[in-house]
Amino acid sequence: MKRITPLLLCLFAAFPSTTHGQTSNIARVQVSAGTVLTFYLHARLNPTSGNSVDGLPKGTLLRVRMLDSIDSAVNPDGTGFHGAVVSGLTSSGELVIHSGSEVRGILAMLRSRSHPEGFRYELLITDLTDHAKSYTLTASLNPSLSDSPVASTSKQATRVNSRSSEADATH
Protein backbone atom coordinates (compact mmCIF):
# COMPACT_ATOMS: atom_id res chain seq x y z
CA MET A 1 0.00 0.00 0.00
CA LYS A 2 2.88 2.37 0.76
CA ARG A 3 4.20 1.96 -2.79
CA ILE A 4 0.83 2.54 -4.42
CA THR A 5 0.32 6.01 -2.90
CA PRO A 6 3.41 7.61 -4.54
CA LEU A 7 2.56 5.82 -7.77
CA LEU A 8 -0.96 7.26 -7.75
CA LEU A 9 0.38 10.74 -7.01
CA CYS A 10 2.78 10.52 -9.94
CA LEU A 11 0.01 9.24 -12.17
CA PHE A 12 -2.28 12.18 -11.30
CA ALA A 13 0.56 14.65 -11.78
CA ALA A 14 1.37 13.22 -15.20
CA PHE A 15 -2.07 13.98 -16.61
CA PRO A 16 -2.59 17.69 -17.03
CA SER A 17 -5.86 19.11 -15.91
CA THR A 18 -7.35 22.47 -16.61
CA THR A 19 -8.55 24.84 -13.99
CA HIS A 20 -10.93 27.65 -14.67
CA GLY A 21 -10.59 30.99 -12.94
CA GLN A 22 -13.47 33.19 -11.97
CA THR A 23 -15.07 35.14 -14.75
CA SER A 24 -15.13 38.89 -14.44
CA ASN A 25 -18.43 40.67 -14.93
CA ILE A 26 -17.05 44.20 -14.67
CA ALA A 27 -18.93 46.44 -17.10
CA ARG A 28 -16.80 46.99 -20.19
CA VAL A 29 -15.81 50.48 -21.36
CA GLN A 30 -15.43 50.67 -25.13
CA VAL A 31 -15.06 53.98 -26.97
CA SER A 32 -14.01 54.48 -30.60
CA ALA A 33 -11.77 57.31 -31.76
CA GLY A 34 -13.90 60.21 -32.98
CA THR A 35 -16.68 59.65 -30.43
CA VAL A 36 -17.79 62.78 -28.56
CA LEU A 37 -18.24 62.16 -24.83
CA THR A 38 -19.47 64.46 -22.07
CA PHE A 39 -17.32 64.57 -18.94
CA TYR A 40 -18.24 66.14 -15.60
CA LEU A 41 -15.62 68.34 -13.94
CA HIS A 42 -14.99 67.17 -10.36
CA ALA A 43 -11.98 68.86 -8.87
CA ARG A 44 -8.82 70.82 -9.38
CA LEU A 45 -5.72 69.66 -7.58
CA ASN A 46 -4.60 73.25 -6.97
CA PRO A 47 -7.84 75.29 -6.81
CA THR A 48 -6.15 78.25 -5.10
CA SER A 49 -3.73 78.94 -7.96
CA GLY A 50 -6.00 81.75 -9.15
CA ASN A 51 -6.23 80.91 -12.85
CA SER A 52 -9.39 81.16 -14.95
CA VAL A 53 -10.13 77.42 -14.95
CA ASP A 54 -10.58 77.59 -11.17
CA GLY A 55 -13.77 79.56 -11.74
CA LEU A 56 -15.49 76.57 -13.32
CA PRO A 57 -17.87 74.95 -10.83
CA LYS A 58 -17.94 71.25 -9.99
CA GLY A 59 -20.24 69.50 -12.45
CA THR A 60 -19.31 71.69 -15.42
CA LEU A 61 -19.81 69.68 -18.61
CA LEU A 62 -16.77 69.22 -20.82
CA ARG A 63 -17.49 67.80 -24.29
CA VAL A 64 -14.50 65.89 -25.65
CA ARG A 65 -13.86 64.21 -29.01
CA MET A 66 -11.81 61.09 -28.33
CA LEU A 67 -8.62 60.90 -30.41
CA ASP A 68 -7.78 57.37 -29.21
CA SER A 69 -9.89 54.23 -28.99
CA ILE A 70 -10.24 52.66 -25.55
CA ASP A 71 -11.48 49.15 -24.77
CA SER A 72 -11.23 47.83 -21.22
CA ALA A 73 -11.23 44.26 -22.58
CA VAL A 74 -7.99 45.03 -24.47
CA ASN A 75 -6.37 48.01 -22.72
CA PRO A 76 -5.08 47.56 -19.16
CA ASP A 77 -5.96 49.74 -16.20
CA GLY A 78 -3.95 52.97 -16.42
CA THR A 79 -3.92 53.17 -20.23
CA GLY A 80 -3.75 56.79 -21.35
CA PHE A 81 -5.94 58.48 -23.92
CA HIS A 82 -6.05 61.85 -25.70
CA GLY A 83 -8.96 64.00 -26.74
CA ALA A 84 -9.88 67.48 -27.90
CA VAL A 85 -12.44 69.84 -26.39
CA VAL A 86 -15.37 70.19 -28.81
CA SER A 87 -16.88 73.43 -27.51
CA GLY A 88 -15.24 76.14 -25.43
CA LEU A 89 -16.31 76.94 -21.87
CA THR A 90 -16.92 80.34 -20.35
CA SER A 91 -16.90 81.52 -16.76
CA SER A 92 -18.19 84.97 -15.77
CA GLY A 93 -18.44 85.89 -19.44
CA GLU A 94 -14.79 85.03 -20.12
CA LEU A 95 -13.74 82.19 -22.43
CA VAL A 96 -11.55 80.01 -20.19
CA ILE A 97 -11.24 76.80 -22.22
CA HIS A 98 -11.01 77.10 -25.99
CA SER A 99 -12.42 74.65 -28.50
CA GLY A 100 -9.65 72.31 -29.64
CA SER A 101 -7.83 72.29 -26.29
CA GLU A 102 -6.05 69.00 -25.64
CA VAL A 103 -7.15 66.70 -22.83
CA ARG A 104 -5.30 63.69 -21.48
CA GLY A 105 -6.73 61.00 -19.30
CA ILE A 106 -6.61 57.38 -18.21
CA LEU A 107 -8.75 54.28 -18.14
CA ALA A 108 -9.05 53.57 -14.42
CA MET A 109 -10.43 50.65 -12.47
CA LEU A 110 -12.09 52.05 -9.36
CA ARG A 111 -13.37 50.25 -6.27
CA SER A 112 -17.15 50.12 -6.24
CA ARG A 113 -19.29 48.94 -3.35
CA SER A 114 -22.37 48.82 -5.57
CA HIS A 115 -20.81 46.51 -8.16
CA PRO A 116 -20.95 42.76 -7.46
CA GLU A 117 -17.30 42.34 -8.47
CA GLY A 118 -16.25 45.28 -6.29
CA PHE A 119 -14.76 47.28 -9.18
CA ARG A 120 -15.82 49.39 -12.15
CA TYR A 121 -14.03 50.99 -15.08
CA GLU A 122 -14.06 54.75 -15.52
CA LEU A 123 -12.55 57.16 -18.04
CA LEU A 124 -10.91 60.02 -16.14
CA ILE A 125 -9.57 63.24 -17.61
CA THR A 126 -6.50 64.24 -15.61
CA ASP A 127 -4.97 67.10 -17.59
CA LEU A 128 -6.10 69.85 -19.95
CA THR A 129 -3.79 71.99 -22.11
CA ASP A 130 -5.18 75.25 -23.48
CA HIS A 131 -2.91 77.65 -25.41
CA ALA A 132 0.30 76.13 -23.95
CA LYS A 133 -1.03 76.29 -20.36
CA SER A 134 -1.58 72.99 -18.58
CA TYR A 135 -4.20 72.47 -15.89
CA THR A 136 -4.42 69.44 -13.62
CA LEU A 137 -8.03 68.45 -13.00
CA THR A 138 -10.35 65.49 -12.58
CA ALA A 139 -13.37 64.85 -14.81
CA SER A 140 -15.32 61.66 -15.47
CA LEU A 141 -18.33 60.42 -17.42
CA ASN A 142 -20.37 60.27 -14.21
CA PRO A 143 -21.59 63.27 -12.20
CA SER A 144 -19.98 61.74 -9.11
CA LEU A 145 -16.88 59.61 -8.63
CA SER A 146 -18.56 57.83 -5.73
CA ASP A 147 -20.54 54.66 -6.32
CA SER A 148 -23.60 55.08 -8.46
CA PRO A 149 -26.25 52.64 -9.64
CA VAL A 150 -25.28 53.18 -13.30
CA ALA A 151 -25.06 49.76 -14.94
CA SER A 152 -23.05 50.74 -17.99
CA THR A 153 -20.73 53.64 -18.71
CA SER A 154 -21.73 53.68 -22.38
CA LYS A 155 -25.42 54.01 -21.47
CA GLN A 156 -24.56 56.85 -19.10
CA ALA A 157 -22.53 58.61 -21.79
CA THR A 158 -25.43 58.31 -24.24
CA ARG A 159 -27.88 59.69 -21.69
CA VAL A 160 -25.56 62.58 -20.84
CA ASN A 161 -24.92 63.47 -24.49
CA SER A 162 -28.63 63.90 -25.16
CA ARG A 163 -28.80 66.69 -22.54
CA SER A 164 -25.37 68.21 -23.04
CA SER A 165 -26.31 70.80 -25.66
CA GLU A 166 -28.69 72.48 -23.19
CA ALA A 167 -26.14 72.38 -20.39
CA ASP A 168 -23.31 73.75 -22.57
CA ALA A 169 -25.29 76.91 -23.15
CA THR A 170 -25.23 77.68 -19.43
CA HIS A 171 -21.45 77.51 -18.98
Image: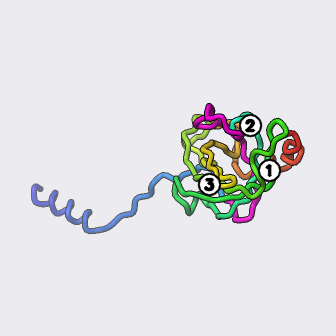
In the image, what residue occupies the spot 72% across and 38% down?
143
Q: Nearer the viewer, mark 1 or mark 3?
A: 1
Q: Is residue 93 left or right of residue 120?
A: right
Where does residue 45 sit, x and y in percent of width and height?
58, 37
Check disc 1 and give the amino acid type.
Answer: Gly
Distance Cα–Cα, label 1 vs label 3: 16 Å
Image quarter of the C terminus: top right
Where does residue 4 sit, x and y in percent of width and height?
14, 60
Q: Which mark is residue 56?
A: 2
| Image quadrant where residue 60 sits | top right
Q: Is residue 14 above or below residue 110?
A: below
In the image, what residue occupies the spot 23% across and 66% down?
11
Q: Which residue is mark 1?
A: 88
Mark closest to the chain's N terminus, 3 or 2: 2
Q: Secondary structure at mark 1?
A: loop
Q: Is residue 17 visible?
A: yes
| Range of magenta residues | 31-53
Mark closest to the chain's N terminus, 1 or 3: 1
Distance Cα–Cα, label 3 vs label 2: 18 Å
* Magenta segment includes 35: yes
